[in-house]
Image: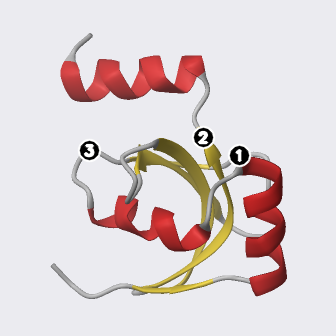
Amino acid sequence: MEELYFEWDEDKRKSNIIKHGVDFADVVSIFYEESTLTIADPRHYDEERYIALGLDAKTRLVVVVHVYRDEDVIRIISARLADFKEKQQFEQVNYGR
């Protein structure tokens, strides 16, 4: 597996912890997990954003909005805990439930 590099705005990281209780540093692990689901975010047309759904370093199911800066550089935009519908989707795809 290739090594990935991560970047984010530090002020945005701090506000994300306050708003969502999720630290960007904890979510980088989802990009190494085979079970992570990633789709293009159709709501942003000025840049190609993606939404990833996976288990973070604390084994919480999280939703991470991100962009690819280069082939191996991911910029994290936001992260939050998954809602009920997202949990169901993750379980259906990964566990057939």
Quarter of the picture containing the N terminus is bottom left
Q: Amino acid at mark 1?
A: Pro
At label 3, the amino acid type is Ser
Position of residue 12 relative to residue 44, above or below, is below
Closest to the observer: 42 or 16? 16
Q: Are marks 1 and 2 in contact (CB under 8 Å)?
A: no
| Classed neighbour count for the residue bearing mark 2: other residues with Cα under 10 Å, few (<14), some (14–19), many (≥20) | some
Q: Residue at x 28, y 66 (%)?
A: 32
User: Mark 3 or mark 2: which comes first in sequence?
Assistant: 3
Q: Position of residue 97 (x, y in %)?
A: 27, 10
Task: Classify residue 10 as left or right of residue 72.
Answer: right
Location of residue 10 with respect to 27 vertically, above or below: below
Q: Secondary structure at mark 1?
A: loop
Residue 38 showing in the rendered view? no
- How many other residues sit within 10 Å of disc 1, few (<14), some (14-19) or many (≥20)? few
Coordinates of residue 14 in the picture (x, y in percent): 78, 73
Query: Can you identify the residue that label 1 sits on?
Result: 42
* Secondary structure under the numbered disc 2 in the rendered image: strand
Q: Earlier in the sequence, mark 1 or mark 3?
A: 3
Which residue position is annotated with label 2? Answer: 81
* Horizontal relation, residue 46 to residue 7: left or right: right
Q: Residue at x 40, y 46 (%)?
A: 54
Q: Is residue 75 visible?
A: yes
Question: For mark 3, what is the residue?
Answer: 35
